[in-house]
Each structure stands twice: as C-alpha cells, then as structure tokens.
Image (tube, rainbow, N blue to C red):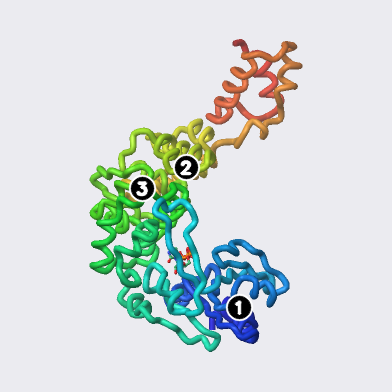
Amino acid sequence: MNEMFQEALPVLKKIEDEGFKAYFVGGCVRDLCLERPIKDIDIATSARPEEIQKIFPKTIPVGIEHGTVIVRHNHVSYEITTFRKEDKYEDYRRPSKVWFVDDLQEDLSRRDFTFNAMAMDTALHLIDHFGGRDDLKLRQIRTVGDPHLRFSEDPLRVMRACRFMSVYDMKIEAETKKAIEKKAPLLKKISTERISIEFIKLLQGVKAGHALEFMKQSTVVEYLPYPLKEQTKEGYLGLEWTKLQTDDQRWAAIILLSQVKDSREFLKSWKLPNGTIKKVQELLAALSVKKWSKIDLYRTGISLALESMTLKSTIEKVNYDQEKDNLHKLASEIPITSLKDLPIDGEEILKIKQKSPGVWLGKLLHEMEEKIVNGDLSTSESVIKDWVKRWEP
Ligand SMILES: Nc1ccn([C@@H]2O[C@H](COP(=O)(O)OP(=O)(O)OP(=O)(O)O)[C@@H](O)[C@H]2O)c(=O)n1
C-alpha cells in the first residue's frame, strides 16, 4: 500500500464517520495506477465545505465558493472538494458557475480524461465508471464523454492532453484527437500563465518531442502564446535525444528548434519571470561560442558553459561528452573564479597608484583579470602589486 494513501486514509475515514461519503480522486489515483510517484492527494466528498470545517480543527478555506477546503493532518495538506458540477462562462477567464451535487458519479463525469475520472474508496477499491484503467493499460488519452464538449468547457484541456502524451508516453484516442484539431483555436481564450504551466510540464516529459510533433500536426502550436513554427531539419524529436536538465535549457531548446529570431520577445510572450528570460538568453549566448578560451569560460562560468554543451547535444544530436571533459580541464587551469580570490582589492590599488577612482580602475582590473586567467600573471601578492605599480593606461 502506498505510504501517502496510508497516511491520508484516516482523513477519509473521519469524514465517513460523520456520515458523509469521501473518496480519493483525480491525479493521485491515476498516478497510483501508473505506479508513479504521487505528488499530492485530493479528496472528493458529499460533505459541504462548512461541514468539513466543523469536522477538522485545522482547515484553510482556499476556495469555499468552489467547494474546496484544505485540511492539515499530520503536517500534510489535503484538498477536500465537495462533489460538484460546473458551467464555464463563455470567456473562460471568469470563474465558472459551480453547484454542489450528492453523487460521486456526477462529479467524476465532469472531469477531463477517463484516467483522471477514477476514484478510490476507504477499502481502496477502484471506482472507474469511464474505463480509465483500460485506457491506462492501452496508454491512451480519451475524454470522459463527448470530446468536443470537454474541450469547449475548458480549452486548457487541449494542452493537458498534450502534456499527458509527453509525460506518460501515451497516444491520443481517435475521436479525442479529432476534437483537439477542431478546438485548438479556443486556446486563444486561455490565459498565458495557465498555458505556460502546462507547456513547461510538457517539455519536462520523456516524449516532449513526440507531443510537439503532434501539436504541430493538429495545429495546436499555432495557438500558443507565441506561435511555434518549427523549421529545423532536426525537428522537435531532438528534445528527446539528450536529457535536458533545467527548464531554462528547455526554453532555449524550443527557441533554437523553432528558429525564433527574437528570443526576448518570445520569452516575454510566455510571460516568464525576468530571471528566466535573463538565464535563457545567457545560455543562448554561451551556446554560440564556437571554441572556448579560458577568458570566455571564466566570464561565462563553467556551469553555464556545460549547460550550453548539453543544449548543443540536444539540438545537433551529437554527444559532446568529450567536449565537456575538455571544458572541465580548461576550467581547472584557471587560477581564480572571481577577482575576490586575489590578495589585492580596489582600495589597495588606489593606495598604490595614489589616484582617485575613475574609468582607469575598471580598465586596470579588467586587464589584470585577463592576464591572470590566461596564466600571464601570477596570483602572488608581490607580483601583482609590482604589476599594478608599473601599469599605465
Ligand atoms: N482542466 C481541468 C483540470 C483538472 N481537471 C480535473 O481535476 C483533477 C485535478 O486537477 P489538477 O490538480 O490540475 O491535477 P492533474 O493535472 O490531474 O495532475 P497533476 O497533479 O499531475 O498536475 C484532474 O485529475 C481532473 O480530474 C479537469 O477535469 N479539467
């Protein structure tokens, strides 16, 4: 028995002891069936939010109007949501209209895909009205009921289908696929932030390349916050060649594979944080270095240089492990990692030169740094002081 479910079982039982129904639902049941790590446990119940607040001493009302209360039990948070049905507003931005129902099946029938519409009771029996278990076995993504309706209700589900395809290495069932092709333009109505979250999860998946190829064929890529036009001969499948380690690398890879001209505009369109934009651009700059010199490596930093080699492997489908070893070797020959490692600082230089600070100081430091990195000047205090004394702008 999975440890997280074991831990959560008393919460479910406590709700039942009070005369209500309660079940594990959604992603946690799906991931349990797939024998994948479980991130968090969600519970659905016939109890209304106020009743949950009465049953448990520690609750956080995160979305009472949508029926959700967080319960803390043994330092773990559980999202407990009353069985509900919902109606989405046409513009997809305002919160949907929600009403509570008494029946689990009704709650499950509003969900997106069959494998997300399973539940588990206190005896750990699987409740699977829509064939989610079989679809998991077939490794197929299929909507609960009419796919056109499901995607119209919440077009983000188009992205979710592509994300599951990538993360779980699944295919999309024929009718669901047809509906994705038809409903893809509705993605324009969904907020960039929600799409970005799904897209980055998709890029982290083992089959990110396949999912993107599918998105290309089904025109989904045209309705992303920045429409993608993949033009490289390598194609998106390159993404699966080497394991990219960070999201920054993944964004950089998409920029390169899609031949995006203005990377900043691209990253801004996805509303990414400034820190991410800066890092991805640094990574792209590091990637454009053809042959690393000591000073390039020192200024870029070994970790960013190595990251760019990983990215290069992905794009070019060539292993650059040997080049990475060379970079490590080159880095080990550089005597300092920053000016702070030197036995002399700016103030000391001002004393030696008996001058007030100015542009000259920056120039001196820059020259000194370059000489030391290249091994043309030793790091011994007396040698450096002597060099400073003799230095002329
Ligand atoms: N657009 C959406 C989003 C969610 N759900 C339902 O709400 C559940 C919980 O959604 P979420 O918390 O987003 O989790 P998942 O995306 O399923 O899984 P993960 O935790 O891996 O993100 C899903 O399993 C699904 O049943 C849905 O029907 N339609």
- Which residue is drawn at the image coordinates 30% and 58% (left, top)? 210
Q: Sequence order check: which comes first, mark 1 or mark 2?
A: 1
- Which residue is drawn at the image coordinates 68% and 77% (left, top)? 55
Q: Which residue is tagged 2?
A: 271
Which mark, by number, is residue 40?
none
Looking at the rendering, which quadrant does residue 2 occupy?
A: bottom right
Q: Ligand 1 within 8 A of label 3's CB?
A: no
- Which residue is drawn at the image coordinates 41% and 51% (left, top)? 91
Q: Position of residue 328 (x, y in %)?
A: 49, 45
Compared to residue 170, the image places residue 104 above or below, namely below
Which quarter of the rendered picture does the N terminus lie within?
A: bottom right
Looking at the rendering, which quadrant does residue 146 occupy?
A: bottom left
Which quarter of the rendered picture does the C terminus lie within?
A: top right
Compared to residue 377, the image places residue 258 above or below, namely below
- The local secondary structure at tag 1 comes to helix
Q: Sequence order check: which comes first, mark 3 or mark 1?
A: 1
- The local secondary structure at tag 3 comes to helix
Q: Which residue is tagged 3?
A: 188
Along the viewing direction, whichever of 378 and 373 lies nearer the viewer: 373
Q: Which residue is tagged 1?
A: 8
Q: Position of residue 284 (x, y in %)?
A: 42, 38
Q: Amino acid at mark 1?
A: Ala
**Residue farthest to the bottom, as pictured:** 123
| 3 or 2: mark nearer the eye | 3
Compared to residue 35, the image places residue 313 above or below, namely above
Along the viewing direction, whichever of 334 and 265 lies nearer the viewer: 265
Q: Sequence order check: which comes first, mark 3 or mark 2?
A: 3
Q: Amino acid at mark 2?
A: Lys
Q: Position of residue 125 (x, y in %)?
A: 48, 87
